[in-house]
Image: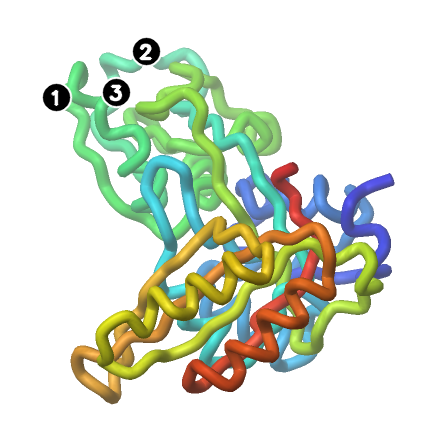
Amino acid sequence: MKIGTFFMIKSVAIQGIKGSFHHIVSEQFFDETISVNECLTFDAVADSILNNQSEAAIMAIENSIAGSIIPNYALIDLHGLHIIGEHYLDIQHHLMALPNQSILEIEEVYSHPMALLQCKTFFKQYPHIKLIEDKDTAEVARRIQEGQISKVAAIASALAAQLFGLEILAESIQTIKHNETRFFVVKTKNSEIPEAEINKASVKFELDHKRGSLATILNVLSDCKLNLTKIQSLPKMDTPWKYAFFVDVTFEDYKDYKKAKTIMEIMAQDFKVLGEYKNAKL
C-alpha cells in the first residue's frame, strides 16, 4: 500500500512536468494512477488547489545540500494551505542529451537553479560548458527531444531520460551523493488522519523582541516531550526586522503535542498549525 492511498485523492498538482522529481513523488506517495496537473511555478501549484483544479499539491520544501526553499513556506502560510503529509526522495541528478554525443561536445546545460547548485562541483572539470538556469529539470529534457537540439544537455531524473529518449552522459553528478529532498503534500483543508496516527506537526508563530522569548517557547516543547526537528525563520515583509518562525516537531503521544500547542497559543503571537501528519523519516 502506498503511503498516500489513505487520502483517496484523484488529482495532484506538481511543480514541473512528468519526468520531474515532483512527478516521482506523486507516484511514490500516492500511486501511478494519480492524475497529475503540471505547473511550471510553485505559485501555479498553489493556484491549482485554490481554484479546485487539483485536490492536493506537492511542494519541495528543503534539500539536504541546498537547504530550505523559503518561498514555499511563505506560499503555504499566505494561502492558508494545510500539510497533510511529507515525503523524502533520494535525488539523483543525471546529465542527459540527444544520443550519440559526448560530454565534450556539450556547450550549454539548462536546468532548475536548485539542480545546478547541487551539481556545480561536477562542472568545474568542464569549464567550456555554460550553465543556464531554467524553470524545470524535466521540461528542459522534453524541449531538447522535441527540438532535437544538439550540443545542449539537461540535468534531470532517469525517468525524464526514459520518457524523452535522451542518453545519460554522466550519472549521479550531484556534489554530495546522498542527496535528499523533503516534499510537503498540501490541501486547502486539514488532514483526516486519526489522532492516534499523527506523530509530527508543523506550526508557525511570531514572538516579541524580548530576551529569551524564543528560548521560552523551545523550553515548552522540551517540557512537553516534543522533539524539535526543524526551525526556520522568515522575515515579515510588512514589519522590518520582525520574524515568523516555522517549526517542525515530532512526538510519540498526541496528548503531549496537544498540551504544547495550548501553551504556545497563549505565549506566541499569530500561532498557526500548518499541518499534523505522519513522520516519514522514522
Contact between marks 3 and 1 (CB within 8 A): the answer is no
Residue at 47% across, 76% down = 77
- Closer to the chain start, of discs 3 and 1, is 3
CA separation, marks 1 and 2?
A: 15 Å
Image vertical order of residue 114 relative to residue 42, above or below: above
Q: Amino acid at mark 3?
A: Phe
Nearer to us of marks 3 and 2 is 3
Residue at 58% across, 74% down = 273
CA separation, marks 3 and 1?
A: 10 Å
User: From the image, which quarter does the C terminus lie in?
Assistant: top right
> To which residue does mark 1 refer?
127
Q: Position of residue 49 (x, y in %)?
A: 63, 73
Residue at 40% across, 71% down = 74
Nearer to us of marks 3 and 1 is 3
CA separation, marks 3 and 2?
A: 16 Å
> To which residue does mark 3 refer?
122
> To which residue does mark 2 refer?
102
Q: Amino acid at mark 2?
A: Ser
Q: Is residue 128 visible?
A: yes
Q: Is residue 48 visible?
A: no
Residue at 31% across, 69% down = 234
Front residue of this view, candidates 113 and 80? 80
User: From the image, which quarter does the N terminus lie in?
Assistant: top right
Q: Is 232 placed left or right of 130 in the picture? A: right
Front residue of this view, candidates 85 and 259? 259
Q: Position of residue 120 (x, y in %)?
A: 23, 29
Callout 2: helix, strand or loop?
A: loop
Callout 3: helix, strand or loop?
A: helix
Quadrant of the rendered image containing residue 162: top right
**Colour scheme in the image?**
rainbow
